[in-house]
Every structure is written in structure tokens, then in C-alpha cells.
Image: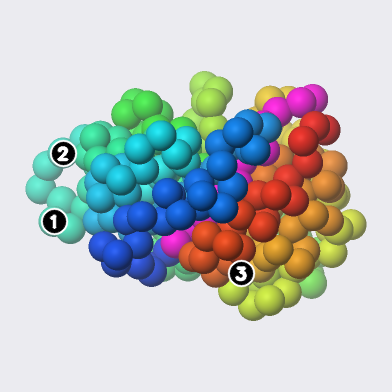
Amino acid sequence: MTMKPLIAANWKMHGNMSWRNKPAEFNEILPTAERRHLDVLICPPAVLLAPLADKRGGTDVWLGAQTCHDQVSGAHTGEMSADMLSDAGAEYVILGHSERRAAGETDADVRARVEAAVKAELIPIICVGESLEQREAGQAEGVVEKQLAGSLPDDLTDYVIAYEPVWAIGTGKTATPGDIKSMHAFIRSRVWPTTRILYGGSVKPANAQEILATENVNGALIGGAGLEMESLAEIAKAAPKRR
Ligand SMILES: O=C(CO)COP(=O)(O)O
């Protein structure tokens, strides 16, 4: 199955207004003409979406949010709806990141947010992944299966899955190519043939080529190495042209 790899940077809670030129900076390092075979996405803190959208011009760098509320509007102090994020320039939204699941977000919460995102025409990137304890207990597939079953609405068509083993996030540890291959094959058996499945967890220029060449890996969700446009571009360059 041929599909465009998605190279996505999750900035988490990093950045300020001086970062609004980063899409243009990225485009200078890796111009659109050299990356027509892939999609590049930056997910900044929500407050930076509009400034980045303003400045991105014709860079062809997509923008995304890092979560959204499940309601369209209302008395929800501090929250942002999918419509607001879309209005500010987002085309994608990361949902159910393990850092949010660890803070109490449940599969049902993720599912409600996915439904809201789809209604606002945002493409959800739904994160799944097991802890080290769960992996060592042989429960990795079971955990991911449960997260997929609980977080995906039945009629969902256009979405992205990000497999991020919790123990590989921000630790410098990556899953072995064999582990990535077998988990992505497992996820593939649960989603559409055209659904992109990203790998996330300490992806960096040094390991990107091997990870992105793995069967059923259709891109990467990148934390730390996505803050610098040089390293994000190195990772993007490692994405295969055709698979
Ligand atoms: O959580 C991640 C992306 O969403 C991965 O973060 P790191 O690339 O910093 O490990």
C-alpha cells in the first residue's frame, strides 16, 4: 500500500512567539519541491497556532493542535474546542497522548474528543502505547488493542494512529525494529489499509532511516528532535520515497 509518510513534530509545552518563523526556516532547509512524497506537520502549543499559520505562507507545512475539548463551546474555563483550533489554523489534532492519559484522560474521553475533532474537520492523530511494566508482563498488544477499541468511534475513516511506547518517550530508548514491526503489523490488522500508523518515542536523525523503513511505519511523531528545524528536516529526509 502506497501512502505519503507523515513527519509530525509535537512541540509539547515548548516555544514562544519567536518560533513563528520555524515553518519558513524548515522550508529553507528542505523546500517543498524536495518533499512532495511526504507530509510535514508541526503541532505547537495552541497559543502559537495562529502566529505560525500567519507566517507559514506557501511553505506547505501543516499545523496541528495537541488536544481539544469534546464540546463545541460552553462553560469550560481554560479549554479549547476543535472548531477554535481549526479556526486558528490547525488541520490535525493529536489526541490521547500518553502524557495526557497519564494525567487522567480515559479511552472514552479520547473517543469523545475524536468525534469533536472530526466534526470540526480536523484529522485526529490518536496515540496508543504500553508502559514498560505492561510490555514486560507481555501485555503490550492487549493494552494497545484495548486503547484502539475504546478510543476510535465506529464510523471513523480519516485518521492517523501514533504508536508511542510510553517507556520510549523522552528517554532516548527506542523500541527494537522487531518490536516496532510486530506492533505496527498488529495495529494494521485493526485499522484501514490506508490509515497512516506513525511511530513515536525518541525518534532522531540517527535512527529515523531504520524506523521509517520498517513495514507499516508510515511516518513519525517526534518530540525533542522536532523542536529544531535542522533535525526535523534530517528526519524528513530519511523518509522513504515509495513503499
Ligand atoms: O511523545 C513524543 C511525541 O509525541 C515523543 O517524544 P520524544 O521524541 O521526545 O521521545
Mark on residue 77? 1
Of circles 3 and 1, which is in front? 3
Residue at (54%, 32%) from the top-left corner?
A: 159
Tell me where residue 71 appears, x and y as whole percent: 24, 39
Cβ of mark 3 under 8 Å from ligand 1: the answer is yes
- Bounds of the magenta span? 1-11
Residue at (83%, 47%) from the top-left corner?
A: 213
Residue at the far right: name it. 178
Residue at (35%, 67%) from the top-left corner?
A: 15
User: Which comes before the other along the chain, label 3 or label 2?
Assistant: 2
Q: Are marks 1 and 2 in contact (CB under 8 Å)?
A: no
Badge 3 density bin: few <14, some 14–19, many ≥20, Cα 10 Å: some
Identified by mark 3, the residue type is Ile
The answer to whether any part of residue 9 appears in the image is yes
Residue at (65%, 38%) from the top-left corner?
A: 34
Badge 2 density bin: few <14, some 14–19, many ≥20, Cα 10 Å: few
Badge 1 density bin: few <14, some 14–19, many ≥20, Cα 10 Å: few
Residue at the far bottom: name it. 171
Indicate the secondary structure of the residue bearing disc 2.
loop
Mark on residue 170? none
